[in-house]
Image (cartoon, grey):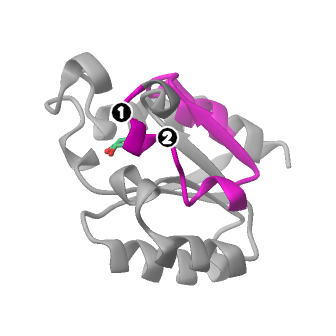
């Protein structure tokens, strides 16, 4: 069975409660139940952290245990050269997901340190963006 790891960065533990007008009112844990039901042939693991270094540790480990990663680095997307360096040497495909459309928000959200290393970038589709990412990776 194909193993895919979803990594969510800072403040995404508050999905459902945080700025629902931007991020919706469904928690990631509830969404994950649906997502796993939609892809019974994929082993979907989930990791959320508020800490930059933890994202890096998890990405470094991921190549040994997973076939692909879905990454929403949240605010670190726009700041982290360290995550960008890790992605550059990662040997498995990464899909970058953003719930909101970062190209249509504040100026400081428009640049992503992740995109250069992503096989696909999905933004502005809400949680459905993760479904699209898994669907794409399942076909690789
Ligand atoms: C986000 C967009 C980021 O700019 C923001 O810092 C987040 C979430 C999104 O999923 O839309 O925390 O990555």
Q: In the current view of this chain or complex, which residue is farthest to the left? A: 17
Displayed quadrant of residue 77: bottom left
**Residue sitting at 30 percent across and 27 percent down?**
23
Q: For label 1, count other residues whose C-alpha is less than 10 Å away and answer few (under 14), some (14-19) or many (20+).
A: few
Question: Circles 2 and 1: CB distance less than 8 Å?
Answer: yes
Question: Residue 58, image x and y in percent?
Answer: 46, 76
Query: Where does the magenta region start and end?
Result: 105-134
Residue identifier under label 1: 106
Residue 96 vs residue 90: left or right?
left
Q: Nearer the viewer, residue 114 or 94?
A: 114
Residue 53 vs residue 4: left or right?
left
Q: In the current view of this chain or complex, which residue is farthest to the right? A: 140
Q: Is residue 122 above or below residue 76?
A: above
Q: Is residue 9 above or below residue 91?
A: above
Q: Nearer the viewer, residue 82 or 6?
A: 82
Q: Is residue 108 above or below residue 73?
A: above
**Residue sitting at 46 percent across and 33 percent down?**
102
**Residue sitting at 54 percent across and 52 percent down?**
112
Residue identifier under label 2: 110
Q: Is mark 2 within 8 Å of ligand 1?
A: no
What element does badge 2 sit on?
loop
Residue 12's disc number = none
Residue 66 vs residue 14: left or right?
right
Question: Residue 96, image x and y in percent?
Answer: 59, 48
Instruction: Answer with the quadrant where ligand 1 appears in the image.
Output: top left
| Whether residue 2 can be seen here | no
| Whether residue 137 can be seen here | yes
From mark 2 to mark 1, how far is it between C-alphas?
A: 7 Å
Q: Point out the image quarter for the N terminus.
A: bottom right
């Amino acid at each position: 069975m194909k193993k895919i790891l979803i990594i969510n960065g800072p403040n995404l533990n508050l999905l459902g409660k945080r700025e629902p007008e931007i991020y919706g009112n469904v928690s990631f844990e509830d969404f994950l139940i649906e997502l796993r039901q939609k892809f019974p042939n994929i082993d979907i693991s989930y990791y959320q952290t508020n800490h930059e270094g933890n994202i890096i540790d998890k990405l470094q480990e991921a190549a040994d245990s997973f076939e692909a990663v879905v990454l929403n680095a949240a605010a670190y997307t726009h700041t982290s050269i360290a995550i960008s360096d890790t992605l550059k040497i990662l040997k498995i495909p990464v899909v970058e997901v953003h719930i909101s459309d970062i190209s249509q928000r504040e100026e400081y959200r428009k640049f992503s340190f992740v995109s250069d290393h992503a096989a696909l970038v999905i933004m502005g589709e809400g949680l459905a963006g993760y479904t699209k990412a898994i669907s794409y990776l399942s076909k690789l």
